[in-house]
């Protein structure tokens, strides 16, 4: 599917480039010539135009969510990010996570009423905004006098409109790539009734609430279990075991958590390769921290191949658990400190609160162990 996405982008990019060249779209009239400075300015404006177009797309999601009663918790546009703080206010931060650099709008529903219809409107808001801004940008450019069309502001407007059109076409196409569904795929899934759609809603609800910082133990366990029992095969279904694992772990039931994690691990072949490392690392952490099995933890750790989709706090968290298990207080403290530093970048801020408590407890254990060692010496 990843290759399919690349093909789609290549075809669209080539098609738009061909049309622009053939019909002289987004180019100044023949009697106007851009200076070298103007060309350099336009080239410099291209990434800015992309950011604006992506921002308008994500704001479309946010506005649609607002109209459905959702509350915006997270908005990312390239390196720019706004996240809602515990105080309730949105605060600007620099986005350092490449996985969300393409744009992300995260809005959380306050209840479970008509979730399928409301999620569908929320998802549709992005492509619709891109379509509207594409029409506005290119339309206004076309209406400008010929002399004005050659100016940098006018061409920047046309760039934003053209990129918005591209975003509309790419995001409205129903496809799945690298384990992630396009807006069009989600709209199609949410437009049909049946078990697959119930499962989609359950997954969206758990994912969005986790990203918004809601702890795993607060997730609706009954809804997750009911979705897992649905008689349907769906790419999202295996992730339900992961959320049930987190729910039980956060609720203080490691036995049930281990069962769901084992089930999740058994379905690894169905996961995109980029996401498999996270499962192996989680299995290693659980084996070390809760099952106290260093051998199993090291075996799982050896299977993991961290990549750009692996949360940066996972590996040091595993290392901290292993160090604590064998009594290496100094290493446990250092690795726990590293993991804590990376936790704010974890996309699932709900589970991050669970891990934060464990890491802080590990640091306290390490400090006490160090003091005891000094006193005994």
Image (spheres, rainbow, N blue to C red):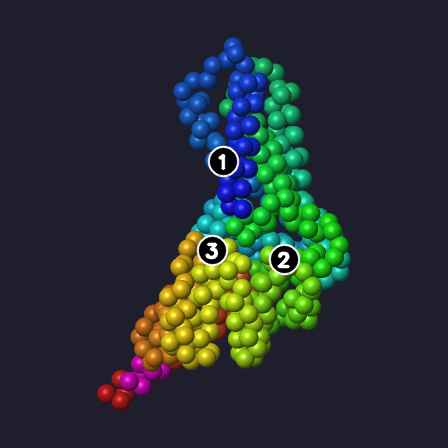
Q: Which residue is mark 1?
A: 48
- Tell me whether circle 1 and circle 2 mark residues in contact (CB < 8 Å): no
**Label 2: how many residues lie within 10 Å, few (<14), some (14-19) or many (20+)?**
few
**Label 3: how many residues lie within 10 Å, few (<14), some (14-19) or many (20+)?**
some
Q: Position of residue 260 (x, y in %)?
A: 56, 72
For the magenta stretch, what is the residue range?
367-373
| Number of numbered tags placed on the structure image | 3
Q: Nearer the viewer, residue 167 or 87?
A: 167
Q: Position of residue 159 (x, y in %)?
A: 54, 29
Q: Is residue 320 visible?
A: no
Q: Earlier in the sequence, mark 1 or mark 3?
A: 1
Q: Which mark identifies residue 273?
A: 3
Image position of 341 with respect to 97: above or below: below
Query: In which quadrant of the rendered view does residue 242 lie?
Result: bottom right
Q: Nearer the viewer, residue 202 or 62?
A: 202
What's the CA distance linking mark 1 and mark 2? 38 Å
Q: Residue at x 65, y 30 (%)?
A: 135
Q: Is residue 169 visible?
A: yes
Q: Which residue is mark 2?
A: 234
What's the CA distance linking mark 3 and mark 2? 17 Å
Image position of 157 with respect to 212: above or below: above
SS of the residue under disc 2: loop
Indicate which label's residue lies in the foreground, 1 or 2: 2
Q: Residue at x 59, y 70 (%)?
A: 244
* For residue 320, side relative to residue 101 (left or right): left
SS of the residue under disc 3: helix
Q: Residue at x 57, y 30 (%)?
A: 162
Q: Earlier in the sequence, mark 1 or mark 2?
A: 1
């Amino acid at each position: 599917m990843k290759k399919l996405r690349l093909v789609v982008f290549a075809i669209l990019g080539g098609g738009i480039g061909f049309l622009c060249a053939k019909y002289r779209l987004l180019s100044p009239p023949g009697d106007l010539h851009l200076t070298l400075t103007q060309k350099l300015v336009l080239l410099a404006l291209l990434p800015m135009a992309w950011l604006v177009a992506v921002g308008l797309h994500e704001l479309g999601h946010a506005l649609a969510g607002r109209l459905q009663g959702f509350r915006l918790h997270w908005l990312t546009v390239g390196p720019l990010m706004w996240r809602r703080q515990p105080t309730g206010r949105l605060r600007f931060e620099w986005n350092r996570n490449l996985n969300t650099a393409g744009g992300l709008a995260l809005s959380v529903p306050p209840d479970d009423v008509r979730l399928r219809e409301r999620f569908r409107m929320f998802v549709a808001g992005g492509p619709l905004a891109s379509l509207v801004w594409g029409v506005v940008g290119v339309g206004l450019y076309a209406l400008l006098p010929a002399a004005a069309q050659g100016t940098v502001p006018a061409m920047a407007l046309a760039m934003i409109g053209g990129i918005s059109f591209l975003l509309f076409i790419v995001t409205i196409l129903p496809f799945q790539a690298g384990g992630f569904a396009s807006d069009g795929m989600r709209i199609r899934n949410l437009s049909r009734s049946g078990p697959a759609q119930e499962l989609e809603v359950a997954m969206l609800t758990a994912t969005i609430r986790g990203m918004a910082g809601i702890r795993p133990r607060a997730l609706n366990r009954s809804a997750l279990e009911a979705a897992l029992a649905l008689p349907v095969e769906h790419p999202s279904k295996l992730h339900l075991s992961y959320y049930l694992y987190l729910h039980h772990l956060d609720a203080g039931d490691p036995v049930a958590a281990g069962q769901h994690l084992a089930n999740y691990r058994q379905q690894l072949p169905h996961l995109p390769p980029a996401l498999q490392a996270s499962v192996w690392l989680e299995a290693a952490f659980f084996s070390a921290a809760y099952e106290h099995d260093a051998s199993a933890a090291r075996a799982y750790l050896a299977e993991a191949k961290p990549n750009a989709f692996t949360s940066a706090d996972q590996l040091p968290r595993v290392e901290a658990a292993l160090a604590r298990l064998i009594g290496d207080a100094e290493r446990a403290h250092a690795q726990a400190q590293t993991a804590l530093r990376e936790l704010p970048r974890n996309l699932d801020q709900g589970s991050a609160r669970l891990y934060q408590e464990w890491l802080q407890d590990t640091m306290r254990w390490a400090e006490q162990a160090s003091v005891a060692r000094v006193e005994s010496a």
